[in-house]
Amino acid sequence: EPEVTQTPSHQVTQMGQEVILRCVPISNHLYFYWYRQILGQKVEFLVSFYNNEISEKSEIFDDQFSVERPDGSNFTLKIRSTKLEDSAMYFCASSRDWTVNEQFFGPGTRLTVL
Amino acid sequence: AQTVTQSQPEMSVQEAETVTLSCTYDTSENNYYLFWYKQPPSRQMILVIRQEAYKQQNATENRFSVNFQKAAKSFSLKISDSQLGDTAMYFCAFEAGNEKLTFGTGTRLTIIP
C-alpha cells in the first residue's frame, strides 16, 4: 500500500540554524500539507500546496518557513533560522483530490532545537 | 473559523468493552468532512474513519463507528470490542473544503488488559 514517507525521523539542530524536512507524498496525489504538533498539544495546520504554489497558510507559517517541491516527488519544509519554540513533530500529508478529500499522513519528523 | 472540541482528555476501558469518544465542532459551513485519527505511541497519524456531512448514514469501519448528529454538531466515535492495540491518542478533525484539517485537542485512550 502506498504511503507518505518523511526524512529524517529525528533532527537535532542548534537555534538559528536552517533545517530542511523532507517528505515524499503518495505518487498520484496532488495536494500536499505540513502540520506540526508541539509535544502534548494538538496538531496544527501550517501550509497547503497545490500546483506548485501555496494555496493556504496559517499564522504560524511566517517568513521563516518555506515549502518547495523541487523535483516532482519530494516536498520540503525549510525553516530558515530555527527557534526553541520550533521544537515539535512535523507531519507531512497528501491527498489525491477534492472528491476523495482524505489526507494521508507521514510518520513525522521530530525536530529538536537546542 | 471552525473549532473542534474534545472534552475528554483521558479515558480508559477494559479490553473487549465498548467505549465512546466525544467530539463537537462549530462551523457555519454546510458541506464538510469529519475524521477520527489515531495516534499511537509511535506518533504516526492514522485515519480511523471519515464522515461526509451530506450523508445521513453513520460511517462504520469494522469495530469503529460514528454517531454523527449534524444539527447538534456532534461526531462521536464508538470502538466496540476494544483491543490493547487501540491504546492511543484519538483526534477528531474537521475539513470544510478549504483543504486544511482542524484538529481537536485529543483524547488519550487506554485499554486495560
Image (cartoon, coloured by chain):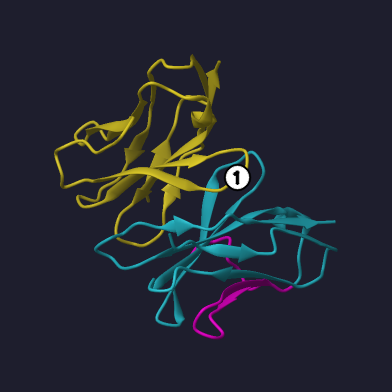
Chain colours: A cyan, B yellow
| Whether residue B13 is visible | yes
Q: Looking at the image, which residue sits at the far bottom?
A: A71
Residue B86's place in the image compared with A53, above or below, is: above
| Whether residue B108 is visible | no
* Percent x, y of residue B110: 55, 23
Question: In the rendered structure, does residue B47 fall within the stretch colored magenta?
Answer: no
Structural crowding at the residue carrying mark 1, measured as other residues with C-alpha within 10 Å and reported as few (<14), some (14–19) or many (≥20): some
Which residues, given as a range, are shown in magenta?
A: A57-80
Under mark 1, the amino acid is Arg
Q: Is residue A13 left or right of residue A96?
A: right
* Percent x, y of residue B83: 47, 25
Q: Secondary structure at mark 1?
A: loop
Q: Is residue B9 left or right of residue B92?
A: right
Pointer 1 residue: B43
Q: Is residue A52 left or right of residue A71?
A: left
In the image, what residue occupies the spot 47% across and 46% down? B46
In the image, what residue occupies the spot 55% across and 77% down? A74
| Quadrant of the rendered image containing residue B49 | top left
Q: Nearer the viewer, residue B102 or A105?
A: A105
Question: In the rendered structure, does residue A79 fall within the stretch colored magenta?
Answer: yes
Q: Nearer the viewer, residue B23 or A62?
A: B23
Q: Nearer the viewer, residue A57 or B23?
A: B23
| Quadrant of the rendered image containing residue A104 | bottom left
In the image, what residue occupies the spot 28% across and 49% down? B33
